[in-house]
Amino acid sequence: MPQPLNYLKETASQTAGPYVHIGLIPAMAGFDIFEKNFSNVLVTPNTKGERITLEGRVLDGSGTPLRDVLLEIWQANAAGRYNHPADRSAGAVEEEFRGWGRAGSDFESGLVTFETIKPGAITDKTGRKCAPHVNVWIVARGINIGLNTRLYFSDEEAANAADPVLNLIEQPVRRKTLIATRSERAGKVVYSFTINLQGPEETVFFDV
Amino acid sequence: MNAQATALQDPRLNRPEPFTPPLGDGGFFQRDRSIHPPAHAPGYKSSVLRSPRQSLLSLENSVSEITGPVFGHNDLGPLDNDLIRNYAKDGDPVGERIIVHGRVMDETGRGVPNTLVEFWQANAGGRYRHKKDTYLAPIDPNFGGCGRALTDDTGYYYFRTVKPGPYPWRNYVNSWRPAHIHFSVFGSGFAQRLITQMYFEGDPLIPVCPILTTIPDKDALDRLVAPLDLNASTPFDSLAYRFDIVLRGQRSTYFENRTAGN
């Protein structure tokens, strides 16, 4: 017998279930318990960068919006810097901008929204430039292990065309599933997205 | 010119960068999907229309995956890890008082320090405080059913609660969830993000649960079952259960990189 390696095994995932709000967004479950709550608003008045709303839905295989889904996003600031010590790129961290938020979908419409800023282009550890993007993690009843995907921005055509991750997607038509569409509504910038769990336009999900 | 001489003139072969340690690039160990439930698990009916059918696209970890949100004690309140008191209105909640404790580690066995652990559960009667839960068991006026904690420097966490009850749900006409507590854990990078459920040693509903049995690996399933831990119980007050959580291993920590001079 060779020497044993003795790595531990990752704990198995289980669905977040239909009542995920109790633990992660108690106000949506219908009660108030914590002094401080996490939310879908990532910005403070001091945050630098262009204010945007990310707005979208997650659709099941029948095209029906999930109305009990929870999304988390993780993103860099406007300078392209993540608020985490493992990001050693040059941009400055903003203490007040954590770069993370969570949102439950509306119980009627399935709409999910985040109030944030458009992130800057990211410099990877190898010096590659990556197109601005938001990392997305999706959990819900019926989702056995959290789904990872990304949102890119429709007005970043050149950067998207050069992005190393988008270019890993073999079929160009599938790259479009990750592009959020920019529009303006009452003076506010809105990026709209649809995440399809199944079907001909199934969103690209990553094994990260 | 022979091949060896050509090679020696290739500047790529004389780079000044040192050969780096094999576990030093900061990425996470590749996720072993064989111990996780598949997305499409027909015995758990809700998964059928909610499971992607295309292959996941494998990504080498970039800075987007090895970073993740950082939380601190400022994010929490003093009662957040005490579910017996954090929603109490006119007394303690009904139920079997328990302590749940354990360590959050990565696959190398290192503790994951200062990471956020969130938990939620039904009350002792199996009813959730949620506007969409209509089970006939009563709401407990003194029980909210959620809490959170930050792990300490060694990855240790603990909280106090009452043991949740089992409850029926719509899958087959007579499906019951075993008693369980939901856990959400962050780790140091977003690629470690995990939601799971903890079950209780000896629960006869465990082997017949359509959600728990989505896990194909018997050992992985057993690792979700917390043993009774009498050593950690408080005499004449609370029983204790031990639940260790393992997140994906990391090929280094930024602390180690720092000491290496990066």
Image (tube, coloured by chain):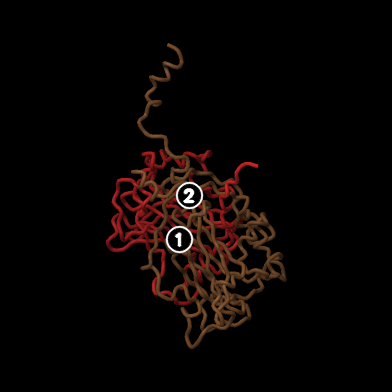
Chain colours: A red, B brown
Is residue B121 visible in this depiction of the protein? Answer: yes
Q: Answer left or right for B138 relative to A165.
A: right
Q: Residue at x 31, y 50 (%)?
A: A79
> Mark 2 sits on what residue?
B250
User: Tag 2's secondary structure?
Assistant: loop
- Indicate the position of residue B119 as horizontal and vertical percent values: 51, 68
- Indicate the position of residue B210 as horizontal and vertical percent values: 68, 63
Q: Residue at x 44, y 43 (%)?
A: B24
**Image quarter hosting the N terminus of chain B:** top left
Tell me if residue B5 comes above or below residue A196 in the rendering.
above
User: Dot 1 falls on which chain?
Assistant: B
Residue situated furthest top in the rendering: B1
- Indicate the position of residue A33 as horizontal and vertical percent values: 45, 76
Tell me if residue B37 comes above or below residue B60 in the rendering.
below
User: Dot 2 falls on which chain?
Assistant: B
Is residue A113 visible in this depiction of the protein? Answer: no
Tell me if residue B6 comes above or below residue B142 in the rendering.
above
> Mark 1 sits on what residue?
B154
User: Tag 1's secondary structure?
Assistant: loop
Label 1 neighbour load within 10 Å: few <14, some 14-19, many 20+? some
Foreground of the two, B72 or A35: B72
Foreground of the two, B183 or A107: B183
**Image quarter hosting the C terminus of chain B:** top left
* Marks 2 & 1 on one chain: yes
Label 2 neighbour load within 10 Å: few <14, some 14-19, many 20+? many
Foreground of the two, A206 or B227: B227
